[in-house]
Amino acid sequence: MNKMGEAKRRARLDPNYGKSKLECFLRKSTLSDAHAIFLKIPNDYVLARIVSVHASIEYACQVLGWCNEVAAKMNNQVRYSHYNAQEIMSKFCFNLISEYGDYESDDIEAISTNHGITEIVKGVEKKYIALEMSDETFIVVNNIEFSDQEKKSESAVLTEDGHLMVFSSYITAAYIADYCHNNDIINNCLPVKQVQVLWTEANKLQGKI
């Protein structure tokens, strides 16, 4: 058997061969400043769908862990070519709630009326957020200044020695952004030692160290 044929034979022995996989990840919500858990569904015309949103990055990471466990179980059980995206989303949410209960979420709550949609609970608003600059590249910005065209270029949070903090993980950037939101930092700057402490805490939260 040639090498290409052997590789295909081994691939077919993989229990996940031929399966597309569900993926869960965290990003800033598209509707508020909260941290959103997104579900990426194979062959979905929507890039990713929001499962739930959370004001706290620590709690968002906890729920993300639940979502990853549910996705892993479904990936081992289901071939997704026979289901549409909405069916998969519904099944995922059903499994998630069945496993972990109907947990808290900081979604915008609204009601429909004859005149349109009336907002009854505003979404999470934060002074500092993690901003995605490009794929897997994030910085922390003062959200109020970033929204102001005249102050936009000065909105990034720097270290006290003037260095721009760039992160490859949304969770790390969001953890630092949450710290900035919850504490009075001066001139959008953080001490280098404080950044090192926060970086370590964020990596522990992600199980990296």
Image: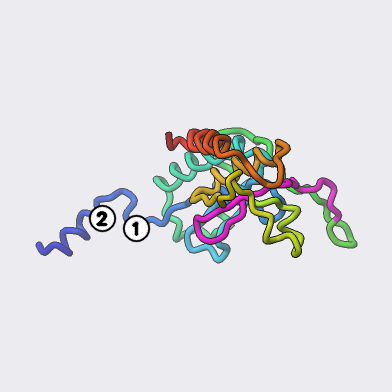
The residue at 65%/40% (across/down) is 178
Magenta stretch in the rendered image: 118-140
Tag shown at residue 18 = 1
Front-most of residues 176 and 159:
159
> Looking at the image, what colour scheme do you see?
rainbow
Front-most of residues 42 and 23:
23
**In this rendering, position of residue 144 left or right of residue 52:** right
Q: Amino acid under label 1?
A: Gly
Q: Secondary structure at mark 1?
A: loop
Residue 110: give x, y in percent of width and height. Answer: 81, 51
Q: CA distance from mark 1 to mark 2?
A: 8 Å
On the question of residue 59 being in view, the answer is: yes
Q: Secondary structure at mark 2?
A: helix
Residue 154: give x, y in percent of width and height. Answer: 68, 57
The residue at 57%/60% (across/down) is 133
Tag shown at residue 12 = 2
| Residues under numbered marks 1 and 2 in contact, where contact means CB atoms less than 8 Å apart | yes
